[in-house]
Image (spheres, helix red, strand yellow):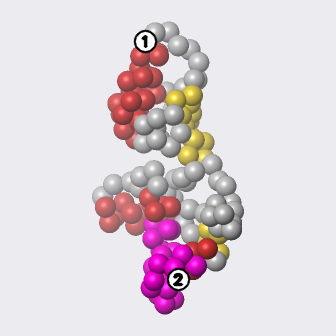
Amino acid sequence: MFYSGYYSEAAPFVQQLKDGGFAGTFVSADGTKDPQFVNQAGDASKGAILSCPCGPATGAFADEYKKKFNTDGGTYSAEGYDLGTILVKGIDSGAITRPALLDFVKNYNGQGVARKYQWSPTGELTTNLIWIFKVQ
């Protein structure tokens, strides 16, 4: 069963599925990939498969994030950090108008914490990474 929505609705939904005898696999995407899905759904979340173009915060980034905010990184923490860093790099390079910053980003090519960032002429990332998580 594929559910395309958010964890707040996915948690009671997967509980209702399991209570109703559903024995298949519950699959969802980044809207459900949140610790609150597991907290709210409890045992009904076990075995769920969640996909996300967001990688887990790891290494030094995860350690620094936890130290600074007293919580683990969230669903898009690493990507948000990377994209903010790219914008700051653009501003530091002198791209201080919207057109100049857009041009900087369009031509950017570099490694971030989460992935390599480079955009196609149509604005899509040139590397498509999807992580698959299984609730245990």
Residue picked out by circle 2: 100
x, y percent for residue 129: 65, 53
Please name whichever residue, 107 or 61, is drawn nearer the observer in this view of the structure: 107
x, y percent for residue 57: 49, 57
Judge whether 130 appears above or below 67 on screen.
above
Please name whichever residue, 136 or 4, is drawn nearer the observer in this view of the structure: 4
The residue positioned 57% from the left and 28% from the top of the image is 2
The residue positioned 50% from the left and 68% from the top of the image is 82
Q: Magenta segment range?
A: 81-103
The residue positioned 34% from the left and 64% from the top of the image is 67
> Does 70 lie within the magenta span?
no
- Classify residue 128 as left or right of residue 64: right
Residue 1, picture quadrant: top right
Residue picked out by circle 1: 19
Q: CA distance from mark 2 to mark 1?
A: 55 Å
x, y percent for residue 135: 51, 34
> Does 83 lie within the magenta span?
yes
Kind of residue sitting beneath label 2: Ala
Q: Main secondary structure of the magenta part?
A: helix
Kind of residue sitting beneath label 1: Asp
